[in-house]
Image (cartoon, grey):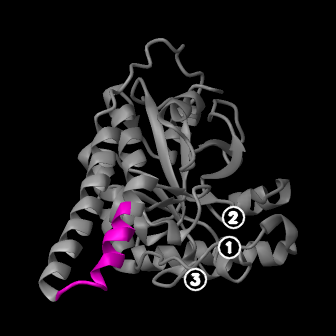
């Protein structure tokens, strides 16, 4: 909100304490109207921004795997490093749709690289790490508008809980995570549910037997809850090494994604796939630049 409007609203509310009951109602209504009008105006200005064509860019030499965490309008849930406001997310999905991108799964990507499976001309994989409830509340309805699906990497012990793994380390404020009903609904809608360990440790910093348990147990828990195979994995904090990647392969996964930046390309190690980070700090132009950067 613009500072002058915010100050005007505050002044109106302060005046409420000094006037009659009838006038209080009028002043409160005026303040609320100002707040709503300003918010709606900002939303409208953002939404009406034209969607540019990406025809000026050369064809991507690989498959973009976008990496999101939270899609949430509330700053109390954390900073913009991990949180993308829904209006920005909607613009990004609209950009992808209007420029001909179609969502595919990580299994589709691996089948394309290994078996020559046909993919759309402009494939994109949309991923979300951790399993925040806002993925279901905000991202899912927006993606559904454009016929998009994605992949959500879930911390199995956090299902129906909070992001205790970051709260305990004082990295993020408490956020609600998806419950089983929401996870199953996404799976039924065509989303891929992937594993993100049991409780989100740095896998490259724990003993191999601990890493193995985290990798295998999260797969088992998700498969039990979904009653379907779980074949893709994401490394918490992007923490992995060749030993950890081999443990993921041995556990029966087909692919794993990292936080290393870049496109997925033929010949890449399928257990060390690169992604494109998307943060709430990105302007529309920055999002387009990142998509075509690698």
Q: Are marks 1 and 2 in contact (CB under 8 Å)?
A: yes
Report helix, strand or loop for mark 1: loop
Residue at coordinates 70% horizontally, 57% vertically from top-left?
249
Residue 146: image location, x then y, percent = 27, 42
The answer for how far apart the CA atoms under marks 1 and 3 are is: 9 Å
Please report the bounds of the magenta region as a residue range. Answer: 8-20
Residue at coordinates 33% horizontally, 27% vertically from top-left?
50
Mark 1 / mark 3, whichever is N-terminal: 3
Q: Which residue is mark 3?
A: 157
Residue at coordinates 35% horizontally, 73% vertically from top-left?
182
Q: Which residue is mark 2?
A: 236
Residue at coordinates 37% horizontally, 69% vertically from top-left?
11
Q: In the rendered structure, find residue 200 and report the number of the disc placed on it.
A: 1
Residue 56 is at least partly visible in this image: yes
Q: In the rendered structure, find residue 215 and report the number of the disc placed on it.
A: none
Residue 264: image location, x then y, percent = 62, 35
């Amino acid at each position: 909100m613009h500072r002058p409007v915010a100050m005007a609203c505050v002044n109106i509310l302060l005046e409420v304490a000094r006037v009659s009951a009838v006038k209080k109602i009028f002043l409160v209504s005026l303040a609320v109207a100002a707040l709503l009008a300003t918010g709606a105006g900002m939303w409208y200005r953002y939404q009406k921004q034209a969607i540019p064509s990406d025809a000026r860019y050369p064809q991507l030499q690989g498959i973009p795997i976008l990496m999101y965490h939270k899609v949430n309008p509330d700053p109390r849930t954390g900073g913009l490093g991990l949180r993308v406001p829904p209006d920005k997310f909607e613009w990004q999905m609209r950009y992808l749709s209007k420029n001909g991108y179609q969502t595919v799964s990580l299994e589709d990507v691996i089948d394309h690289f290994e078996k020559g499976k046909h993919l759309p001309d402009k494939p994109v994989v949309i991923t979300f790490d951790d399993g925040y409830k806002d993925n279901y509340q905000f991202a899912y309805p927006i993606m559904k508008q454009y016929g998009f699906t994605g992949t959500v990497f879930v911390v199995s012990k956090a299902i129906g809980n909070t992001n205790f793994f970051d709260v305990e380390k004082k990295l993020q404020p408490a956020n609600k995570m998806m419950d089983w009903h929401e996870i199953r609904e996404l799976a039924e809608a065509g989303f891929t549910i992937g594993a993100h360990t049991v409780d989100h440790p740095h896998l490259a910093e724990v003993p191999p037997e601990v890493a193995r348990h985290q990798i295998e147990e999260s797969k088992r828990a998700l498969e039990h809850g979904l009653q379907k195979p779980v074949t893709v994995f994401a490394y918490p904090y992007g923490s992995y090494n060749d030993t950890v990647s081999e443990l993921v392969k041995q556990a029966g996964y087909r692919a794993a994604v990292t936080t290393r930046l870049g496109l997925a390309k033929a010949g890449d190690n399928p257990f060390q796939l690169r992604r494109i980070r998307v943060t709430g700090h990105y302007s529309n132009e920055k999002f387009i630049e990142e998509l075509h950067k690698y």
